Amino acid sequence: MEKAVIMSKQSSLMDDFRPIMPPLIRLLAGIIVLIVIQATVLGFPGITALIPTTTFTIAALVVFTLGLVVSAIVLKFGTQLATSLGDAYKSYRNYTPLLTWLFQMIALVILYNVSKPITASYFATIPWAYPLIFLLIAIGPTIKVVMNTVNALEGKNTSRHLQTN
């Protein structure tokens, strides 16, 4: 005689977060690994030496390279996290574009900060141009998220009235 074991499925807290865990773990693990690599490499002797025929150091180049990778990780896995959050939880679906925009801006700020030491000599005579370039880059996603948020708040089926004289 076989015994049938009936197990009840109890929902746990981890079951609620299961859909967003893979992109969240990828995001956090990628950032932590690169921070550890950066801390290790910046401890090497001679890392503060200038690169011949340039005005920046080897350390600045290492920070720029690792910052570029961190920025790409934040952009890729952060937007995946926002998408999976919207897919898993219907009540957060309207906030997916806003969360995606937040990760885009975080990646842009990281890129701005790590590229500043490398580009400082190029923008020495026009220091206002460097922040202006990043501001212009940030305007596109900002306008897009504002338009999407306004459209979501107004509703997709609202009729627009044409005013005539």
Image (cartoon, helix red, strand yellow):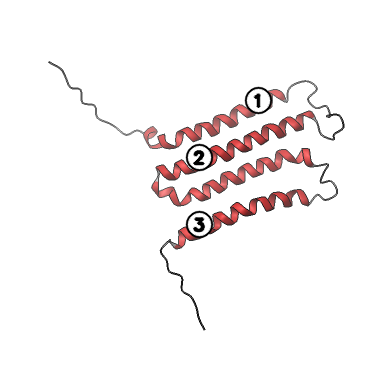
Asked whether the beta carbons under mark 2 and mark 1 sit within 8 Å of each other, the answer is no
Given the image, on which type of amino acid does mark 3 rest?
A: Thr
Q: Position of residue 113 (x, y in %)?
A: 71, 41
Question: Distance between the Cα atoms at labels 2 and 3?
Answer: 19 Å
Q: Quadrant of the N terminus?
A: top left
The mark nearer the N terminus, 3 or 1, is 1
Q: Where is residue 16 in the image (x, y as percent from the top left)?
A: 38, 37
Residue at 48% over, 50% down: 95
Residue at 71% over, 24% down: 41
Given the image, on which type of amino acid does mark 2 rest?
A: Gln
Residue at 76% over, 29% down: 59
Q: Where is residue 103 in the image (x, y as percent from the top left)?
A: 57, 44
Q: Which mark is residue 22?
A: none
Asked whether the beta carbons under mark 2 and mark 3 sit within 8 Å of each other, the answer is no
Q: Name the residue under label 3.
A: 149
The mark nearer the N terminus, 2 or 1, is 1
Mark 3, residues whose alpha carbon is within 10 Å: few (<14), some, or many (≥20)? some
